[in-house]
């Protein structure tokens, strides 16, 4: 069961730790500790039955000192403003850590998208895009897909903004279909980045990927791609969970078969999946399986003070945003469990979103090999920087990552100064 700790308070606590170690001036701390802009919108949508429902949406911009802001749009029934604030702050650190010229933002709508028809989903998306359009632009704020949103939804947003402008604006959003300016490799980028972080951590620990036991919580875009890539590299993926349940096989799950099965389901879940030697577990049991690598790639606060003492993984690679609470971090560190933090481990998505933005501005597109090799270069470079600092100062990887990221953003703020 997930912890219910406030995600924005967690994000601020993580920042405070880094700010203290860096000795940041109080004025800089005050600026970076809160978002720069927050927009809350309440907007009507006409449903198929003729009725009208009012939905609430958010767009939060945390910091713009290093460039336009970047961050996903999610559709979820339990989202609130503090969650969006936390995600925007994490995006700032993520972009700074991998040295791409963006600040952090996040947004979304409080809705269960599976309850809407395709037409209702399009009307909701276009109205929400219109409401937040005062913030959006290739040189201001560039959204992307996130939880429960996809390339089609990004296409509707791009088209809506383009209709307002009177001309096509492909660089206003990333994660679009290839046919209208999307980038090759974008869909797989976050999962590919997670798999690279598993590879690099294993290398530092002098472990082979062959036979490495991996458990993955989440089998959406991030978890399923990471599972497939790690399976192809010889890892033994022994546990998988999605919203429908958890599955375990000590000799290794058939990841290609599970991906094919989930794609063929109406809700793209593993509901009803059966195979010889596969047993079903609870989500709690899955997180506590004996394994080499645990990848939480679902939602926030999954590893907390109550279950951290029972985690048996040697390494945790955070595919999701904020899956581990600060209290759990301390327990895991004391137990010698290595945590590759979210702002590093799942940065592949924003890196390739940056590539898509650049390609859209230039109207010059790269092949998939170029995209993947550039992604690997940037992410491995950031990993090596974090690992070296953590080793030199005997710090957890999360603390080292925050020191590097917060320092970059703080320096940008101080160099630019205060206006007026």
Image (tube, rainbow, N blue to C red):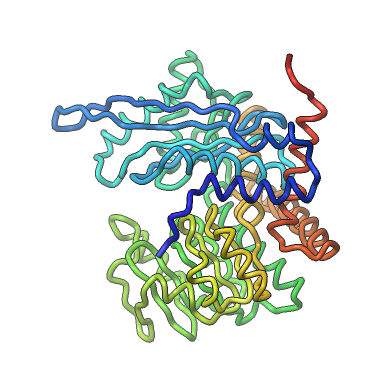
Residue 84 is situated, as x and y percent measured from the top left of the image, at 49, 40
Left or right of residue 244: residue 390: right
Q: Nearer the viewer, residue 188 or 280?
A: 280
Residue 114 is situated, as x and y percent measured from the top left of the image, at 28, 47
Please name the residue shown 60% across and 41% down the image.
89
Q: Is residue 177 visible?
A: no
Please name the residue shown 48% across and 49% down the image.
6
Residue 367 is situated, as x and y percent measured from the top left of the image, at 64, 45
Q: Nearer the viewer, residue 5 or 376?
A: 5
Q: For residue 64, which quarter of the picture? A: top right
Q: Is residue 173 visible?
A: yes
Q: For residue 37, which quarter of the picture? A: top right
Residue projecting furthest to the front: 26
**Quadrant including the C terminus:** top right
**Quadrant including the N terminus:** bottom left
Q: For residue 23, which quarter of the picture? A: top right
The count of marks equals 0
Left or right of residue 411: residue 31: left
Q: Nearer the viewer, residue 44 or 253?
A: 44
Left or right of residue 111: residue 396: right
Residue 308 is situated, as x and y percent measured from the top left of the image, at 54, 71
């Amino acid at each position: 069961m997930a912890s219910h700790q406030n995600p924005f308070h967690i994000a601020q606590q993580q920042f405070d730790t880094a700010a203290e170690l860096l000795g940041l001036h109080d004025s800089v701390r005050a600026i970076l500790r809160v978002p720069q802009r927050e927009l809350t919108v309440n907007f009507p949508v006409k449903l198929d039955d003729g009725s009208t429902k009012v939905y609430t949406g958010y767009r939060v911009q945390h910091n713009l000192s290093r460039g336009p802001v970047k961050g996903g749009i999610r559709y979820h029934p339990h989202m609130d403003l503090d969650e969006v604030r936390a995600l925007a702050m994490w995006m700032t650190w993520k972009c700074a850590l991998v040295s791409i010229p963006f600040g952090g933002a996040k947004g979304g709508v409080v809705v269960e998208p599976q309850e809407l028809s395709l037409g209702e989903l399009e009307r909701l998306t276009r109205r929400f895009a219109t409401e937040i359009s005062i913030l959006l632009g290739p040189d201001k704020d560039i959204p992307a897909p996130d939880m429960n949103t996809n390339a089609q939804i990004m296409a509707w947003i791009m088209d809506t903004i383009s209709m307002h402008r009177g001309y096509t604006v492909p660089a206003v959003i990333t994660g679009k279909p290839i046919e209208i300016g999307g980038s090759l490799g974008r869909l797989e980028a976050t999962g590919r980045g997670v798999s690279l972080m598993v590879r690099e951590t294993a290398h530092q620990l002098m472990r082979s990927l062959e036979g490495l036991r991996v458990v993955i919580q989440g089998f959406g875009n991030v978890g399923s791609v990471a599972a497939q890539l790690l399976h192809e590299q010889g890892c033994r993926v022994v546990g998988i969970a999605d919203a429908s349940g958890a599955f375990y096989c000590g000799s290794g799950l058939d990841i290609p078969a599970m991906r094919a099965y989930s794609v063929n389901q109406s809700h793209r879940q593993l509901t009803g999946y059966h195979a010889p030697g596969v047993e079903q577990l609870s989500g709690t049991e899955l997180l506590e399986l004996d394994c080499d690598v645990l990848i939480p790639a679902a939602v926030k606060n999954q590893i907390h003070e109550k279950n951290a003492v029972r985690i048996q993984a040697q390494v945790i690679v955070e595919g999701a945003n904020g899956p581990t609470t600060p209290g759990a971090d301390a327990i895991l560190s004391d137990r010698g469990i290595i945590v590759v933090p979210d702002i590093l481990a799942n940065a592949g998505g924003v890196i390739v979103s940056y590539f898509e933005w650049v390609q859209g501005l230039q109207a010059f597109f790269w092949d998939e090999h170029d995209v993947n090799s550039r992604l690997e270069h940037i992410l491995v470079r950031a990993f090596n920087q974090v690992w070296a600092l953590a080793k030199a100062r005997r710090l957890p990887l999360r603390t080292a990552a925050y020191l590097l990221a917060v320092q970059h953003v703080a320096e940008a703020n101080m160099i630019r100064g205060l206006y007026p």
